[in-house]
Image: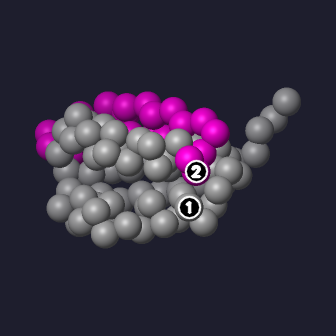
Amino acid sequence: MNICVVSTFEGEVEEYMSMIAEFDEQIRSAVSDFDIGVVKTDKPGISKVIAMINVVHEELFDEIMSSPKMIEWDKAHNNTDIIYSLERIN
């Protein structure tokens, strides 16, 4: 399942990347591909990233995304995720 996650949060992109790095091994067990792009917001203190993810183990991916540590980070940074389902066009 290919998804696009648009995350908008308070804080710096480096904080997001650090949090993702903490879950790196687990994420790599649930996905076959994972790319992150940074979006310029021009809003002081507000960051946005776009993650393109090919999820191969949905249950494991859901566990990671709903883990207490991930939920705590989201709350602390007022994070909002918008998730899109994608289909590859050949």
Can residue 88 be seen at all in this image of the molecule? yes
Q: CA distance from mark 2 to mark 1?
A: 6 Å
Q: Residue at x 45, y 43 (%)?
A: 25
As displayed, is residue 53 above or below residue 59?
above
As displayed, is residue 76 above or below residue 8?
below
Callout 2 amino acid = Ala
Q: Which residues are magenta?
A: 29-51
Q: Secondary structure at mark 1?
A: helix
Callout 1 amino acid = Leu
Q: In this figure, which residue is indicated by the disc labeled 1?
A: 60
Q: In this figure, which residue is indicated by the disc labeled 2?
A: 30
Q: Position of residue 34 (x, y in %)?
A: 54, 37
As displayed, is residue 53 above or below residue 76?
above
Q: Position of residue 55 (x, y in %)?
A: 63, 50
Q: Would you call the spot at circle 1 few (<14 residues within 10 Å), some (14-19), or many (20 or more)?
A: some
- Relative to the observer, which residue lies in front, 3 or 29? 29
Q: Secondary structure at mark 2?
A: helix
Mark 2 and mark 1 residues within 8 Å of each other at the beta carbon:
yes
Number of numbered discs on residues: 2
Q: In the current view of this chain or complex, which residue is farthest to the right? A: 90
Q: Which mark is residue 18?
A: none
Q: Residue at x 65, y 56 (%)?
A: 57
Q: Is residue 45 left or right of residue 7?
A: left
Q: Residue at x 44, y 61 (%)?
A: 65
As displayed, is residue 69 above or below residue 39?
below
Q: Position of residue 40 (x, y in %)?
A: 32, 31
- Relative to the observer, which residue lies in front, 61 or 82? 61
Residue 54, picture quadrant? top right
Can residue 48 be seen at all in this image of the molecule? no
Q: Position of residue 8 (x, y in %)?
A: 33, 50
